[in-house]
Image: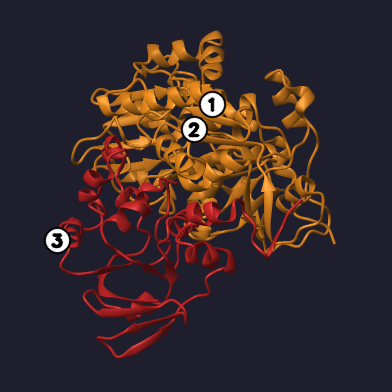
């Protein structure tokens, strides 16, 4: 019997067949922490090993993406501890401004077939390049870093067959919002999601990472795309073609559930407060005339080059509405540079956007772009839980870069299609 | 082991943002201070009551408790507030592993059968939750054997210190 992609990656890593439900102890190719979870991880490593220690320093990475540059002395102290840990162990570091961990590791390190864990729930983003990538707590990540391995329950797989072309103004963000709205925030708990069907061949890596970054938002362990020609081209662009190999599920793999999605019938969608599964059509929400104080473009979900391009396409030659602020945080330094070379950053800036460094920005609600009581934000991020952007009395909507850009122009939640006709 | 306490009810889909809000991230290296804000955005009365220390509270959630961020501080703060066990209809997977890793059981049970303030008793060995207020016995979902092994050692750090490695009988290695 054939294997699902999740089973196949773990089987290849272990050298024997595995099946959903098995418990396996598997070597880890890359373990990462960010600045919000790193200090606790390294406290646990000290408890485990009696010192700052890593089994494989070249397979451990710290990314300072949530809290830098520090806006509080406590954050500066956390950064200092993390940099000291780098000095003590020789692990990899992406310092402030290098970008969001999930964007950086996929650009530079992750290979198809890798096993990747991280003390950040969106570590599953890298599953877009056929890696078994999943988020864990600090203690589990500490174990992976100290021992070079971790235990996993091999997940059952839900297969999503995507058919039909995406209409103008509809993006991969709308695909994943549609899925979360359909199956619910606990619709794939403990499962692997696996994407297939004719449509995925036409989805760029940027589009795939948007979908895989939000597997967590339906409870899944990860959401996988196969490694194909598009993966090869993208890795070539990042100078890593030699690390590419094709990898896909076997024919005849056993799926727990099969869900077909007609992408040609999708519309621009918006997740309304306070959960990512609370999904409505942008055109319907637009009728409510909801005034927007802040629009945020960025994150591991929608902070890549194509996302900035999609926003710039709408904002070029237009202005952000009076009374609305547009914040842009590119996903990585590479994204930032490419967007500058193409004139995308210039177009966004000319429209009135505030362009910041490559980082998580307002998404985790810790120190950048926080909201006041009653304020409304439309963000391209992945979750809109109550309090997410730093204030439980604010209102957060999730949307695609195109919908966010159209919203910035109008100053209220807006279906982007009339800007693209 | 039998655990007793008073149920403090929360709704469905309690996220880690509600348990350990991002705006308090500056307290992540200072959990004794951070715990004063545990579950604040879900129910601001919980932390002051739990930290008074004259009553053991059992956190009782609904669907997908602990969804969202991987921040382990969420599980640690609940434990630090004196809560010995979390009950819910279902748990988000990272939060679930975090609980067992730090030695705090998380049990699935039909929490519709437990009201706010009910006296509950949890018999971990037999997988039973007794609602003493309603004189009712509720069956809990099975705890996966690996998680039970970790819990019996008091968490994964103590487990590894004792065994020197991950060596679960049921696990297959390369």
The one of A270 and B71 positioned closer to us in this rendering: B71
Q: Is residue B155 left or right of residue A322?
A: right
Q: Which quadrant would residue B103 be assigned to in this image?
A: bottom left
Which disc number belongs to residue A407?
Answer: none
Determine which residue is flagged by label 1. A89
Q: Whole-Å distance between the Cαs marked 2 and 3?
A: 36 Å
Q: Badges 1 and 2: C-beta atoms under 8 Å apart? A: yes
**Residue A331 visible in the picture:** no
> Within 10 Å of the Cα at label 2, are there few (<14), some (14-19), or many (20+) other Cα atoms?
some
Determine which residue is flagged by label 3. B52
Q: Whole-Å distance between the Cαs marked 3 and 1?
A: 42 Å
Q: Nearer the viewer, mark 2 or mark 3?
A: 2
Q: Dot 3 lies on which element? A: helix
Same chain letter for marks 3 and 1: no
The one of B57 and A330 positioned closer to us in this rendering: B57
Q: Which chain is orange?
A: A
Q: Which quadrant would residue A329 be assigned to in this image?
A: top left
> Within 10 Å of the Cα at label 1, are there few (<14), some (14-19), or many (20+) other Cα atoms?
some
Q: The residue marked by circle 1 belongs to what chain? A: A
Identify the residue at image location x=77%, y=36%.
A228
Q: Which chain is red?
A: B
Between disc 1 and disc 2, whose residue precedes? 2
Q: Position of residue B117 (x, y in %)?
A: 21, 75
Q: Badges 3 and 1: C-beta atoms under 8 Å apart? A: no
Q: Is residue B39 left or right of residue A167?
A: left
Same chain letter for marks 2 and 3: no
Q: Dot 1 lies on which element? A: helix
Which disc number belongs to residue A52?
Answer: 2
Q: Whole-Å distance between the Cαs marked 1 and 2?
A: 7 Å
Q: Which quadrant would residue A1 be assigned to in this image?
A: bottom right
């Amino acid at each position: 019997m054939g294997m699902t992609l999740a089973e196949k990656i773990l089987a290849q890593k272990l050298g024997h067949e595995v099946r959903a439900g098995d418990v396996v102890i598997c070597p880890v190719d890359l373990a990462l922490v960010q600045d919000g979870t790193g200090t606790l991880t390294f406290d646990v490593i000290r408890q485990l090993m009696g010192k700052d220690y890593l089994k494989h320093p070249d397979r451990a990475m710290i990314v300072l993406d949530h809290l830098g540059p520090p806006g509080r002395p406590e954050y500066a102290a956390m950064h200092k501890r993390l940099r000291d840990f780098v000095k003590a162990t020789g692990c990899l570091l992406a310092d402030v401004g290098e970008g969001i961990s999930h964007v950086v590791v996929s650009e530079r390190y992750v290979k198809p077939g890798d096993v990747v864990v991280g003390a950040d729930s969106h570590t599953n983003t890298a599953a877009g390049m056929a890696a078994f990538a999943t988020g864990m707590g600090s203690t589990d990540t500490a174990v992976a870093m100290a021992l070079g391995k971790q235990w996993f329950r091999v997940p059952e797989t839900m297969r999503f067959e995507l058919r039909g072309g995406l209409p103008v103004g509809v993006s991969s963000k709308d695909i994943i919002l549609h899925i979360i709205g359909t199956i619910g925030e606990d619709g794939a708990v403990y499962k692997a999601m696996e994407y297939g069907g004719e449509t995925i061949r036409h989805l760029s890596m940027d589009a795939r990472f948007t979908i895989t970054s939000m597997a967590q938002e339906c409870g899944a362990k990860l959401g996988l795309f196969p490694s194909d020609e598009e993966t090869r081209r993208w890795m070539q662009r990042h100078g890593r073609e030699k690390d590419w190999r094709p990898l896909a599920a076997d024919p005849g793999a056993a799926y727990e559930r099969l869900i077909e999605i007609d992408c040609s019938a999708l519309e621009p969608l918006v997740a309304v407060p306070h959960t990512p599964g609370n999904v409505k059509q942008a055109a319907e929400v637009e009728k409510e005339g909801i005034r927007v104080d802040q629009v945020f473009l960025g994150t591991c979900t929608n902070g890549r080059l194509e996302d900035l391009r999609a926003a710039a396409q709408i904002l070029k030659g237009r202005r952000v509405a009076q009374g609305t602020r547009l914040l842009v945080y590119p996903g990585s330094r590479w994204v930032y540079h490419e967007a500058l070379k193409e004139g995308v950053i210039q177009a966004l800036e000319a429209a009135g956007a505030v362009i910041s460094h490559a980082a998580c920005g307002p998404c985790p609600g810790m120190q950048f772009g926080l909201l006041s009581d009653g304020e409304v934000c439309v963000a391209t991020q992945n979750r809109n839980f109550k309090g997410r952007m730093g204030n439980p009395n604010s209102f957060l909507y999730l949307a695609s870069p195109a919908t966010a850009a159209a919203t910035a122009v109008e100053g209220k939640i807006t279906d982007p299609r009339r800007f693209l006709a | 082991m039998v655990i007793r306490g008073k149920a403090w009810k929360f709704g469905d889909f309690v996220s880690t943002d509600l348990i350990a809000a991002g705006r308090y991230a500056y307290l992540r290296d200072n959990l004794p201070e951070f715990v004063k804000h545990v579950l604040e955005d879900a129910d601001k009365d919980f932390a002051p009551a739990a930290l008074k220390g004259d009553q053991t509270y059992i956190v009782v959630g609904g669907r997908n408790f602990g969804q969202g961020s991987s921040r382990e501080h969420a599980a640690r703060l609940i434990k630090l507030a004196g809560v010995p066990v979390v009950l819910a209809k279902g748990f988000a997977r990272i939060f679930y592993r975090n609980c067992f890793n730090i030695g705090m059981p998380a049990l699935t049970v039909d929490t519709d059968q437990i009201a706010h303030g009910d006296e509950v008793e949890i018999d971990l060995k037999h997988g039973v939750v007794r609602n003493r207020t309603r004189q009712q016995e509720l069956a809990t979902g099975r705890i996966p054997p690996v998680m039970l092994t970790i819990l019996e050692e008091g968490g994964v750090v103590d487990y590894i210190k004792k065994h020197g490695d991950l060596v679960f009988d049921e696990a297959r290695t390369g």
